[in-house]
Structures are given as C-alpha cells and as structure tokens.
Image: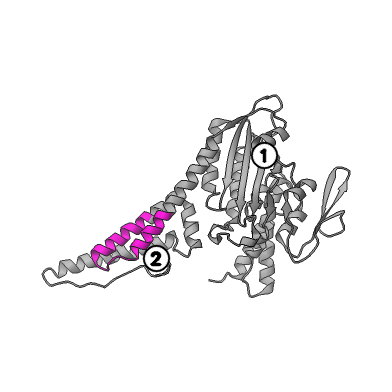
Amino acid sequence: MRPTFSNAVAALATSLSLAVGGTAIAQQSAPLPSTLATPNVYVVPLKGQMGTDISMQLMKMYVEDIKKVKPDIIVLELFSADINQNFYLQDDDRGEYGLGILEEYRDMVKMFREDLRDIPQVMWVEDSVGFGSLLALAWPDMYIRSDGRLMGLVRVSQMAAGWDDPDVASKMMRARVGIGNGFLQQGGYPLELGEAMMSPSETLSIKFEGRKVVWLPNTSGTWIVDGTSEGVANFSSTLAEESGLADGVADDLDDLMFLLGYREYKKLDNGEKIGTGYVEDWRKAYERCKDWLRDASEVDGDAVGLGKQKGLLEKVVAAIKQYPAIEYRMRMEGMPGRMQLELLIDNLRKEIQRFKDAEKGNRGGGGSSSGGRGLGGGMGGRRGS
C-alpha cells in the first residue's frame, strides 16, 4: 500500500523534533579514567547486518552485562559494510544489506548511552558502509582503522524514493535526513556534515580556524570534501583523520588503547561471547524457520495435514518472538511476518475444527476433503521449483 501524505507529514514532524534549530546537541561521554594504569576494557562487537545482527535485542544484552561487570572503559567495535572493498567484483549479498529502521537505531543509541552514561565510551570503526555509519556518528569519541570506511549514508535519503508527488517526496527525504541528523546531534557533529553525507544535492568543504575545524555547506572552504550535487560525502580513514572527523587511526585494540593513553589494559571477553552467541543463535533459528515454512507449504489438505501445518507455523511464530531479527529478515525475503502467520494459524484452527465437526456428523459416511491446501508463494517453499 502506497504511503499517504498524512504519513509523510507525521514523519516530518518526528524528524523536526530531533533537529531543532540546526545546532548539535551532544551527549557528552564520561571522561576517561586518569588514575588507572591498567583499566578494564569491555569490547562491544557491532558486527554484521544492521537491524538483525546489530539490534536492540543485542544492545540490551550488552547493557545488562556491562552493568554487572562495571568496566572502566567501553569500546564499541563497529564492522557493518553493505558493500565490500572489492567494488569491481560485484559479489555483495543484497540479503545482507542493512535495514532502514532508523527509529529503532535511534532508540538503541539513546538507551545504550543513557543507561551507561557513567562509563566512558569510545567508538572504533573497523569498516562501515550503510546505516551503520549513523551509529558511528552517534559517539563523540571516534577512531577508525587504517583501511576502514565511513560511507553509505545516501541510503537514508534513498528511503524516501517511490513517491509520485515530487513535493511529498521532498518532504519525506527531509524527514529521513532529519532523523539521521539526530544521530549526529548525539555525537556532537555539525548537521552540515550529515546533510552532505545523506543528501546528494548538498556539497561540503572545511576550513581551519587555528586548530578548530569548521564544516561548510558549500565549496568555499580550504578542503573540498564533496564538490558535486551528484553524490554524497564519503570518508576514507585518511580523510576522516585529516579532517578531524575521527580522533585517530587504530588498526587493533592495542593501538586504540595507546592512543587513549594506556600502555596496558585488561580486555574483558564478555561482549565478544555475547555478540557471537546471539548472531549464531538467531541465524540458526532463521534457517529452521525457512525449513518449517517450506514443510508447511507441502502438507496435505486433510485434518492431519492442516494440524501439522498449524504446528509448524506456531514454531515459526515462537522463534520470531524469541528473536525479532527473524521477522525483519523474513520480510526482506518476501516471507510473511508475525501478524500474517498468526492470522493463518487462526484460520487453520477454524478449518481443523470444521473437519472435526464434519467427522462427527458423518461418522460412517465417508467424509470429505478440501484437497491440498498449501501456503502459496513466498512462504518458504523450495526456490526455483
């Protein structure tokens, strides 16, 4: 169903609440501990697909554990690239592209930063192309790997595509960019930077006032970052460091901690165990859901077959309740969501009851069958068959 103009206005209002006056409102991080020679460092892996591998569910797990462990420093390790480094190969898996659920990402950042406000937090970008770059820009203390990238935010404005009315399309793009700029506000970055990274029509340059970097929404600065209206501003590690966007370049955790002023530190492994376990578990459950949906589409149309179908769909719903990431991924693949499945289950329950009622009324009379009742296309059936 095509969105309505009223929806566009509502989305625009949401974005304006995040970008009041065009000024950056940073939530300052707690200062790094200056009296500890060997701080405890909790690494928070943010690796994989935005919206599934990197999700609110996982961030809540991190927050809960960090509150128990009470580390001295938190390092968020971001590796989320929609496009790999070998552009000429064109071998990227579009099924792994990040999901544009900006409001959820915004709430995720807010929850993490506010709940752990008393612990210093550092963002370390290993590589980020796509919506993950919004996360990177939500932290004021940001470092990047020497071959890392901070790119791909054109996808934010691309979310507004598909409107027939150009006026509505323009308003929707401004709404999306406004929400995106809310992340930069959290990190204390200028909104001119966000505009240029998300909107192809914007340009960007920088000038220097002593040691201060001033970002300009035009090409009048000393360095031109984005001088055309045909693309968006993207940052290699070199440009990110030289422009002052990143605080430094670090290729491993030792490098990062040295830049932060610590020759020694103790790395806590909790985060890596939590992150790896979560990603493995939800992806295994997702594969099982695809099998269950395929099997459900191949059952017979009698009471026994419909009972089996209902049971399989109930397993899928249970998995979605346990891992919301499954539903996001299923929708990307054209499969039904939780509400559709629950409606199917309810209809199957009624159909099974009709079979039972008919059997009671026709005992000894032979009964009837409704024939093979499959789930139809897009329900996890065998592809290409």
**Residue found 67% across the figure and 64% down from its top:** 173
Secondary element at tag 1: strand
**Left or right: 301, with 324 as reference point:** left
Which quadrant of the structure image shows residue 22? bottom right
Which quadrant of the structure image shows residue 130? bottom right
Residue of label 1: 122
Within 10 Å of the Cα at label 2, are there few (<14), some (14-19), or many (20+) other Cα atoms?
some
Q: Is residue 305 magenta?
A: yes
Q: Which mark is residue 382?
A: 2
**Main secondary-structure element of the magenta-colored stretch:** helix
Q: Amino acid at mark 1?
A: Val
Within 10 Å of the Cα at label 1, are there few (<14), some (14-19), or many (20+) other Cα atoms?
many
| Residue 302 higher or lower than 21, as above or below | below
**Residue found 51% across the figure and 43% down from its top:** 276
Label 1 vs 2, first from the N-terminus:
1
Q: Which residues, given as a range, are shown in magenta?
A: 287-315
Residue lying at the far bottom in this picture: please name it.
164
Point out the image quarter for the C terminus: bottom left
Residue lying at the far left in this picture: please name it.
364
| Residue 325 higher or lower than 261, as above or below | below
